[in-house]
Image: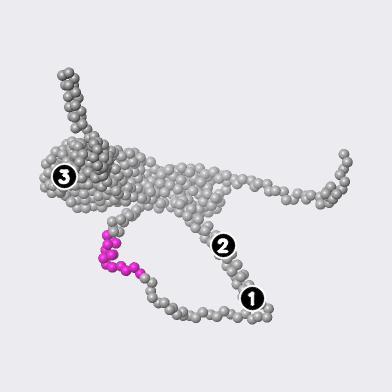
Amino acid sequence: MRRRLALLVAATVAAGIGGCASQGMPPGGPPDAELPVLQRILPDSNAVRVRVPAVVLQFDEVVSERSAPTAAPGGAAAGGAAGGLAGLLVLSPSDGRDEVVWRREALELRPRGGFRPNTAYRVTLLPGLADLRGNRITEPFSFVFSTGAAIPTGEVSGVLFDWTTGRPAANARVDLFRQADTLFRWSARTDSLGRFRVRELTSGLYEVRAWVDANNDRRISFREISDVARVALSDTATLELYAYGRDTLPPRLEQVEWIDSTAIRIRLDRGIVADWDGRSAELVGADSAVIPLGGPFVPSAVYDSLARMRSAARDSTARDSVARAADSTAAAADSAPTRGEIAVPAPRPPDTVRVENTRPEPRDTVTRDSVAADSVAADSIVRPVFKRVVPVTQWTAPLAAPLAPGLYRFRIRDARGLNGRSVNTERELRVQPPPPPRPSPARDRAPADSTARDTTARGAPPRRP
C-alpha cells in the first residue's frame, strides 16, 4: 500500500513539473481576444553606456513558443531568419550568431559574442508574435540603445529597383558593412516601393549590398538579382540601386525571324539596354554582300505598337474618305432645286453670339494650408522614379526591300549586356520561296449542252426496257 501511494505521489509531482515546463493551453475562462502587450524592455529605448548580456522584452501574458514572423505592412521591417522565434526578434548590426530564448512571458536576445563597445544597436520585433490563444501582433516594434556615450545619427537611405523589369524591388534585403569586418552587418528590408533606410551609423566607408532573397537564406545566390555600392558616409547618404543577375555571360542571339516580308526580328538570351540602335548589326547574303535595312532596330514592343497605330490610321482615313463622299453626295442631293424652284443660300450666322448665362463653372478652392497638406501626403506616397533604361531581348527593324529566297546570316558585334560583357554573335536566316499558287476552280469549262433537253420532264413516255 505504501509503495503504491509513493508511486502515485511521484507521478503527480512529475506531471506538475511537466506542466510548468510546457506552455500548454489555458483552461476554460472567457474568450481572450487581446493581443500580447509589451510591458517592459531591457535596456530602455535610447539608453547609452549599456552593459547588459542580453535584450529582454517582457509581455503581460505567456507568448507562444511556436510563433513565427509574418509579412509586415509595407514590408518595412528588418530582415531575419526564415521562421521561428529567431526570425521574430532581429538585432542590427549583428554577425548572424544571435540566440533568442523563450521565457514564457518574455523573450531574450543574446548575441553569441556579446554586445560590442561603442556601437548603437536597433532591436526589431517583427509581426507574428502570438499568445497561447493565437492572438497575433500585426505591427512591428523597434527600439535603439548604445554601448557608447551617444547614439550616432548617420543614415543611409535609398531605393532598390529590379533593373530587368524597371519596377521597385519589394521586400528585398539590404546589408551594410565595413570592409574591415564583412561579417558584422547592419540589415534592413525594402518596403513595397523598394525603399529602405539604415540608421544609427557612424561616419566612415561602407559597402551596401541589396538583393531579392528568393530562397530567404540571407545569402546572394547565383540566380538572385542584386546590386552593390560603396558609400563614404559623413552624415546622410541616398542611393539608387539597380539589381540584376550577376553572371559573366554576354548576350547571344537565340532566333532571327522574317516578319511578313517587311521586317526582321531578333531575340537574345539576355537583355541589352534599349538605347542600342543596331548599328553593330548586319544582314549578309549568300554572296557575303551586306543587305541594307530600311531603318534602325527598335524594341519589338515599340515596333508592333507603331505598326498598329499606322494600321489604325489607314483604316480611319479610309472610313473618313468614304463618309465624306457619302456626305457630299447627300448634301448635293438635298441642295439640288426641284423643278420650278430657285435655290436660296442658307443665311450666314452672325459673327458674335450673345451668351445669357455668364456665371463661371464652379472650381475647387485651394488654400495655402491644403497645398501644404497635399504636398506632405504626396511626399509620403510618391513612387520612386526609374531613371535607367529597361533591358530588351527582342528587337525589330524594317527591311528596305523584301528578301529573295535563300540563306542569310545575321551578325551582331559588341552586343553589351548589363554586366558589361560583350561578344560577337550570329545566326542563320533561311527565307523559303513562296508556296505555289493553289489551282483555281476551272472557269473555262464548256457549259452543259443547252440543247440537251430532259424529255422525261416534258412528259415524254419513258423508254421501254
Identify the residue under disc 2.
318
Dot 3 amino acid type: Arg
Asked whether 3 or 409 is in front, the reply is 3
Please tell me whether mark 2 sits on a helix, a strand or a loop.
helix
Identify the residue under disc 3.
40
Task: Please state if 371 lies on the left or on the right of 357 as rendered.
Answer: left
- Residue 47: percent from the left, percent from the top? 13, 47
If the image is split into quadrants, where does the C terminus sit?
Answer: top right
Indicate whether 93 appears above or below 364. Answer: above
Identify the residue under disc 1.
336
Gap between marks 1 and 2 measured at Cα: 27 Å
Gap between marks 1 and 3 measured at Cα: 97 Å
- Label located before the other in sequence (1 or 2): 2
Dot 1 amino acid type: Ala
Determine the residue positioned at 37% across, 47% down.
164
Indicate whether 80 appears above or below 384. Answer: above
Magenta residues, start to end: 363-376
Dot 2 amino acid type: Ala
Front disc: 1 or 3: 3
Q: Main secondary structure of the magenta part?
A: helix
- Label located before the other in sequence (3 or 2): 3
Determine the residue positioned at 59% across, 64% down.
322
Indicate whether 289 appears above or below 109. Answer: below
Front disc: 3 or 2: 3
Q: Is residue 371 magenta?
A: yes
- Residue 352: percent from the left, percent from the top? 46, 80
Gap between marks 3 and 2 measured at Cα: 78 Å
Asked whether 419 or 18 is in front, the reply is 18
- Residue 144: percent from the left, percent from the top? 17, 47
